[in-house]
Image (tube, helix red, strand yellow):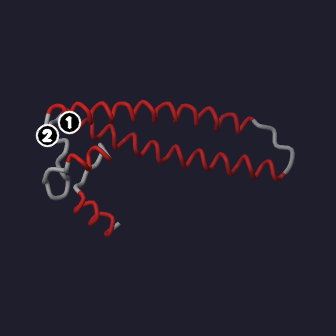
Amino acid sequence: MKKEDLSFLKEELETRKEKIKRVLKDNEKEIKALTRTDASDEADHATISTDSAIEQAINYQQLKELKEIDYALFKMDNKTYGICEMCEETIGIQRLKVKPQAKYCIVCREIVEKTS
């Protein structure tokens, strides 16, 4: 992989990581505000509960992506970034530009999706 491509992808990963951290922090504030909200009736309770569940689901997905990003950055440091974890072939640069934290090439990704 070209040095410029690697630098670009690292910057993309770090930028996304910071954005996720901001979203998680904002969601945490939102969840705390929801739990402090005084509900006057069952409809309010239901709305608060639903909103809280949605925020928690978003947090779960964001934390999952954050772990993937951290792992990709770890692989960059270990010079194993861009190598498919299944077939050990190089992951195409176009795929990495779309999803910089990709662990699998396109072919192996389809196999993983079909078996999951």
Locate residue 5, reporting x and y percent: 20, 36
Q: Depth check: 45 or 109 in front?
A: 109
Task: Name the residue rendered at 29%, 43% in the picture.
Answer: 100
Say what amino acid the circle numbered 1 marks.
Answer: Asp
Q: Depth check: 6 or 71 in front?
A: 6
Give the image quarter of residue 112. Answer: bottom left
Task: Name the residue rendered at 33%, 39% in the picture.
Answer: 69
Q: Where's the C terminus, which quadrant? A: bottom left
Disc 2 to disc 1: CB gap under 8 Å = yes
For label 1, count other residues whose C-alpha is less than 10 Å away and answer few (under 14), some (14-19) or many (20+): few
Task: Name the residue rendered at 28%, 43% in the picture.
Answer: 97
For label 2, count other residues whose C-alpha is less than 10 Å away and answer few (under 14), some (14-19) or many (20+): few
The correct choice, above or below, for 68 with respect to 13 in the image is: below
User: Which residue in the protein does label 2 denote?
Assistant: 1
Locate residue 101, reporting x and y percent: 30, 44
Task: Name the residue rendered at 47%, 48% in the picture.
Answer: 61
Q: Secondary structure at mark 2?
A: loop
Locate residue 33, reporting x and y percent: 69, 34
Q: Secondary structure at mark 1?
A: helix
User: Which residue in the protein does label 1 denote?
Assistant: 5
Q: In the rendered view, does 77 fall on the left or right side of 17?
A: left
Give the image quarter of residue 65. Answer: top left
Locate residue 35, reporting x and y percent: 71, 39
